[in-house]
Image (cartoon, helix red, strand yellow):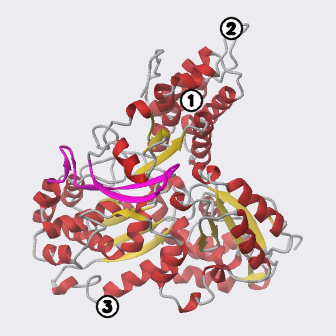
Amino acid sequence: MDNGETRNNGISGTCCDTAPVPDAEIAAICKTFGNDRHRMLDILRKVQDRYRCIAPATMDRIAAETGLTRIEVEGVASFYSFLSLTPKGRITIRLCDDIVDRFAGLAEVTAVFEEVLGVKVGQTAEDGAFSLEVTPCIGMCDQAPAAMVNDVVLTRLTPESARRAAEALKAGRTPEQLVSDRFAELTPHERVTRMVENNIRHAGEVLLGPVPEDAGLARAAGMTPAQIITMIEDSGLRGCGGAGFTTGRKWRFAASERAEKHFVLCNADEGEPGTFKDRVLLTERPHLLVEGMTIAARAIGAREGILYLRGEYVYLRELLENVLEERRRRGLLGKGILGVKGFDFDIRLQLGAGAYICGEEGALISSCEGLPGEPKTRPPFPVNRGYLGYPTVVNNVETYCHAARIVDRGAKWFHAMGTEGSHGTKLFSICGDCLNPGIYELPYGHTVWGILEMAGGQDAAAVQVGGPSGTMIARDSFDRKLTFDDLATGGAIIVFNGQRNILEIVEYYMSFFVHESCGYCTPCRVGNVFLQKAIQKFRKGLANPEDIDYLKELSGTIIETSRCGLGMTSPNPVLSTLENFPLVYAAVSKPSKDGIRDTFDIQSAIDGARKIAKRRSYIFDKDFTR
């Protein structure tokens, strides 16, 4: 027992205080989830929450209870950033390290926490009281700097408020008491809104204005599945996560698959930095979301659904669980919904654990199956073989909410809004250097200038549309329209004024993609690292004009040979700024004295990956942009 861990006498592992954890306790946690290997993420989260780490011997016991191998359990435990194989503090503080938070004063806030708590970022106090970490965007860019303190969210931090919070925690107050001394007496909705403001700046006609209760579901109960799907198709609704696939077609594909089971999954893992629209819908329209999922279930013949909530939104868990339970009591979930025989559908909440890649539908499905959140090879597509191998519809929060309203008001009503090919309204998450950050529900077709005028960002020098995986545009492009056919976005609009360093922003976004890559394929795992290093070279004034061609070639190769959407879009910060801010790169490039560049041979490094993917190499010319 040289490290305090043992399997003797029914002891499974240790907690952070080195107290033995009985096998029976781990077995009871596994039993809570039916010893189901597909609930592995739930099991590991429960262990992490209770014991603050997942000890090696604990993984052995979990493996035995679920019929897996130790390596399979450890593969999941080591994949997610909110799970840890080493002890964490009783209170873990995760400071949001998004670029917006950095520009809003994150460094000063971090220094205060380090000073008061006596730990540096990345460390755990010797007495196990605190861990201090940084984490990518937690969906609070409209009220940055922000932090998670266990399951509590703190927003609009300043050095002064950070000091008060840190001193209170050190004095023994709980994270919940930072929100309210009466936290236990507050309703779930009151708890949520005490922590986080919704910042609804413009409520549109579809989602954030007046919404009749379950009117869409009541109408769907009297319709056939085919009628529901046709109505969604006729409305022109497209997926609101950014890809824009036609929602009705997706539902029709899934419904046409003959299978024993069908599933409806909601992607509430909006991890794209700068995006927080679904956070607001989950807070203000949770019933509308569940209504939309239930309508989708009737359309495709599903009896089971999963609401996948990103780990950063754990503060919403109690609110959503209460909504699901209330709807069961009212006959809006479960068997015989609204008294319709055979209309059976229920939803379970699946909490993520800090992995941006799980916003990709294949990775999300893997996570729901109790696996590491790695994307799946396509085809087959989820509508053919998705969750557990069954036909599965995956849409995001905003899409399901729109679907519910369409069934209530009709396809023509929705189709008449917006522009040709981009129908209805869109929720825009606006943040950064503007006077009025928050949520704006607007019909498709507004220009970037129009958005900036509403948000008070007229002095913008650059706007990042669609988050890091989207496009950064300059002032000469602010007359472009926010539509699927021009500037498509999942919702994020990040405003940067002329004082911001474009290359600093690009380097941050590349570091984000390096951190969040699942590591499966070489182009993404290695290529993004070298893109980041190349940008650092420009920032240091060590680049030459040939390095610009190198950036384009390397970016194109990553896009062409990566397995999933992360690698296919991760070079976008580089490519879009090369196109729209060419002088930024030219200004810091100097001709090479000896004409020799120190570069990385990405082509050789990914040769094996290319053979597997059976893809040819791209040779890009000087003017390539994608």
* Vertical placement of residue 342 versus 289, above or below: below
- The answer for how far apart the CA atoms under marks 1 and 2 are is 26 Å
Image location of residue 587, percent across then percent down: 61, 21
Is label 1 in a helix, a strand or a loop? loop
Q: Which residues are drawn in magenta?
A: 416-444
Q: Is residue 270 left or right of residue 131?
A: left
Q: Quadrant of residue 442?
A: bottom left
The local crowd at label 2, few if under 14, some if 14 to 19, many if 20 or more residues have their Cα within 10 Å, is few
| Residue at image point 85% right, 74% down | 127
Residue under label 3, please give it.
329
Give the mark nearest the N terminus, 1 or 3: 3
Asked if the residue at tag 2 contacts the one at tag 1, i.e. Cβ–Cβ closer than 8 Å, the answer is no
- The answer for how far apart the CA atoms under marks 1 and 3 are is 55 Å
Is label 2 in a helix, a strand or a loop? loop
- Amino acid type of the residue that numbered disc 2 sits on in the rendered structure: Gly
* Vertical placement of residue 232 versus 209, above or below: above
Residue under label 1, please give it.
606
Q: Is residue 428 magenta?
A: yes
Image location of residue 41, percent across then percent down: 54, 68
- Amino acid type of the residue that numbered disc 1 sits on in the rendered structure: Ile
- Amino acid type of the residue that numbered disc 3 sits on in the rendered structure: Arg
Residue under label 2, please give it.
595
Image location of residue 56, percent across then percent down: 73, 68
Asked if residue 362 can be seen in this view, the reply is no
**How many labels, in total?**
3
Image location of residue 441, percent across then percent down: 32, 59
In front: label 1 or label 3: 3
| Residue at image point 61% right, 80% down | 179
